[in-house]
Amino acid sequence: MQILDGKSLALKIEETLKEEVQLLNKKQITPGLAVILVGDDPASQSYVNMKAKACKRTGIYSTTHEMPKSITQDSLLQTINMLNQNPNIDGILVQLPLPQHINTTTILEAIAPHKDVDGFHPFNVGRISANLEGFTPATPMGVITLLQAYDINLKGKNVVIVGTSNIVGKPLGALFLNHKSTITLCHIYTNNLIEHTKNADILCVAVGKPNLITKEMVKEGAIVVDIGINRLENGKIIGDVDFNNVAPICSFITPVPGGVGPMTIASLLQNTIKATKIRANL
């Protein structure tokens, strides 16, 4: 069994991005990322802080627009419109989830596609699904990058993805399909989940349910990618996979924390640099 170490790989990616930013700076170009945080959800605040620190480490200019939970949708749209027109901002990220009175789809569609570094705009979703150039959602992008870094061949692999969110499950399925994998998407209404997971060469889980995947559900030698993040009452962070019992039968497995999480942030930074280069016609 080998650990898929996302933390170490993310640091290597950051070093490369730092060099790219320095080259851009020599051309009087500074990459800029704007993050919009609505409300005071502790998990969202934590993610935003991690993203800001990563930007600082790599030399990307970042700004956070903190807004009260009671903000109106119109006010939020005005801020996005302002950032769309700001030439110093290459990427716009709206931290999810948003309060219930705000229509998430309307907000995400308001972001200019060329600044959509989260890859959630339907324009980019469509391009990725069609295997065309676009902005790939950060978490799925991070998963593929991590697997490729360990020379894992995706072609022809049976890939089972548990969880079909627009943020992770669906785009991750599209990426595997683009890499010639055979994919199965499972969700809360899937009957006999074990019948699917037991056949997986690569099993990806993104549900948000601690220890959902047990040893009996995984075949010997499988590659397991745990994308779930769950905080227990004692404060410990664990994934969706029963790591201690599943790990010994895997060929590769991601830890939580230290697996997919750092790769998500690294991928976001990669998308921001990509947006900068598009802006600068590089």
Image: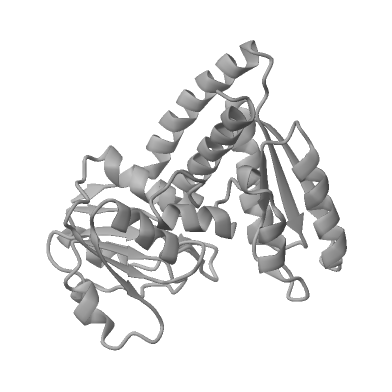
Q: Which colouring convention does the figure follow?
A: one colour
- Residue 15 appears anywhere in the view: yes
Q: Residue at x 75, y 31 (%)?
A: 88
Q: Residue at x 70, y 63 (%)?
A: 41
Task: Report the side of 138 relative to 29 (left or right).
Answer: left
Please state, as top left, top right, bottom left or bottom right, where the C terminus lies in the image. top right
Q: Nearer the viewer, residue 81 or 32?
A: 81
Residue 196 placement: quadrant = bottom left
Q: Residue at x 59, y 45 (%)?
A: 117
Q: Residue at x 40, y 55 (%)?
A: 130
Task: Report the side of 224 relative to 234 (left or right).
Answer: left
Task: Report the side of 1 relative to 119 (left or right).
Answer: left
Q: Nearer the viewer, residue 67 or 72?
A: 72
Residue 61 x/y as whole percent: 70, 30
Q: Nearer the viewer, residue 101 or 14?
A: 101
Residue 264 x/y as whole percent: 49, 48
- Residue 258 appears anywhere in the view: no
Q: Which residue is outermost to the top?
A: 26
Residue 236 x/y as whole percent: 49, 61
Residue 281 x/y as whole percent: 59, 25
Task: Report the side of 114 relative to 179 (left or right).
Answer: right
**How many marks can you see?**
0
* Above-or-below relation of 108 to 10: below
